[in-house]
Image (cartoon, rainbow, N blue to C red):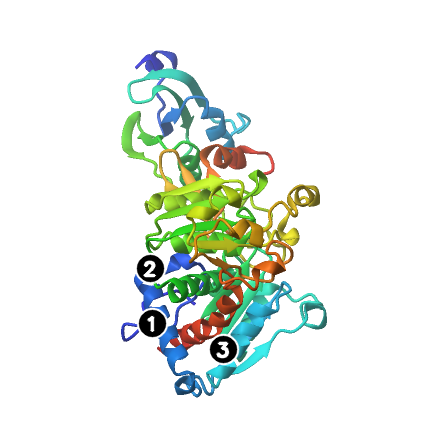
Amino acid sequence: MEEGLLVRKIREGTVIDHIPAGRALNVLKILGLTGREGLTIAVVMNVPSRKLGVKDIVKVEKRFLEPSEVDKIALIAPSATINIIRDFQVASKRRVEPPAVVTGILRCPNPNCVTNSEREPVTPRFVRVSLSPLKLKCAYCEETLSEAEIVDQLVSPYG
Amino acid sequence: MVSGLGSRGNPFYGRDVLSILDFSRSDLEYLFAEADRVRRDPSAFSGELRGYVLATAFFEPSTRTRLSFQAAMLRLGGSCIDLGELEKSSIAKGENFADTVRMLDAYADVIVVRHRLEGAARFAAEVAEKPVINAGDGKRHHPTQAMLDLYSVKTLKGSVDGLVYGVLGDLKYGRAAASFILGLSLFKPRKVYLISPGLLKAREDVKEALRERGVGFEEVESPSEVIGELDVLYVTRIQRERFPDPSEYEKVRGSYVVDSKLLRNAKEGLIVLHPLPRVDEISFDVDGTPHAKYFEQARLGIPLRMALLKLVLKG
């Protein structure tokens, strides 16, 4: 509601709501949005939220998400909801859920893991072992990735 | 090969053997019962796997595990092929691991893999159609060692349950110790003491497995603190080759020795086990004591691996 006072409604596009406070810029990074695309983008940070205490919101006009982008957002902002807006109305609304198996998005931090071996045709795969806090386990070497490490990897310039 | 349910009630048939935790207590008891049958009458099993071929692919130096698998297969009437020394194999020509596994998959009925990389056996199992047995991958798993260690305890002490265990050594990088502790978590030990220098404490995932299954454990630094309570003392070597930092190895080498002086305070029935080879962590004066069971433990590896190969390949 307070956010409504700050940013106007969009005609068509995506609103990513309930992002954990401080991660809105990470969401933009995952979507590859720099502001130079010519799209109208609104970023609202640290808005009071009944559910989260404080939250971030990202609104992007004329942009819809690919499934792989939704998976990545789910990994860095497991509480997020994605609203599709058409003609100023919410056409659909859904919560993201970190996938039970994450394939090919993250790399294993264990340098001695077979997935880090050059020339082997193996795609890194992680299995979700906990939702809150989010924890993933490498399906090969069993190294655990914490939520902070997941966020780091997805938004790192080398990720 | 994807692990699956066995046929005719045999939980091992056609399965990969990658981690001790892929199996339940009742699976392991099924295996132990088969190993008992092999021990009672080995000759009855001498032609059991005639016509079957086992491939050993050891990408890390090993003697006893490789020979133990090969001896087990030969005693079952099967044949063995071996990748041989890496510098003389196609690996030296630049072949990758996946292609090597595909080749062995075409030649053999079961592949036994050892590799320095963690997860290599699981990857091999995805590449191969035939069952893959993990003979050690990096610092993680050595499931058949854990099977024979648990089988040794059952054979020598009558049961795995209800005993007080000390697991001594490199609990951080040592895959035999980690697999043994994970295996114990499937049973009901009275207590497990994790004995190691501070730098080599057990990994969190290993301790978590004990917690999850309600096994009481305590971490201590010296075997002398608990020797009088133990029924089983499982000793492992500090493996220089697993240390990412050689200076870390220098800090802990020789930090514990099991000798007859330490064993003076032990219970009469304490058994000392070791996956071998030992270097200097068990002094030779222990060999003559009734506590020393590590060579008997090594001998039990043959019937245990015979039973496992038979169950995986034939049911």
Looking at the image, can residue A102 be seen?
A: no
Badge 2 crowding class, 10 Å Cα cut-off, few under 14, some 14 to 19, many 20 or more, is some
Give a yes or no on whether discs 2 and 3 share a subunit: yes
Badge 1 crowding class, 10 Å Cα cut-off, few under 14, some 14 to 19, many 20 or more, is some
**Toward the viewer: B237 or A69?**
B237
The disc, 3 or 1, on the residue closer to the chain's N-terminal end is 1
**Toward the viewer: A68 or B34?**
B34
Q: Is residue A59 above or below residue B71?
A: above
**Toward the viewer: A51 or B278?**
B278
Residue B72's disc is: 3
Residue B201's disc is: none
Badge 3 crowding class, 10 Å Cα cut-off, few under 14, some 14 to 19, many 20 or more, is many
| Chain ID at mark 1 | B
Looking at the image, can residue A130 be seen?
A: yes
Quarter of the image with the C terminus of chain A is top right
The disc, 2 or 3, on the residue closer to the chain's N-terminal end is 2
Three-letter amino acid code at the position of disc 2: Ser
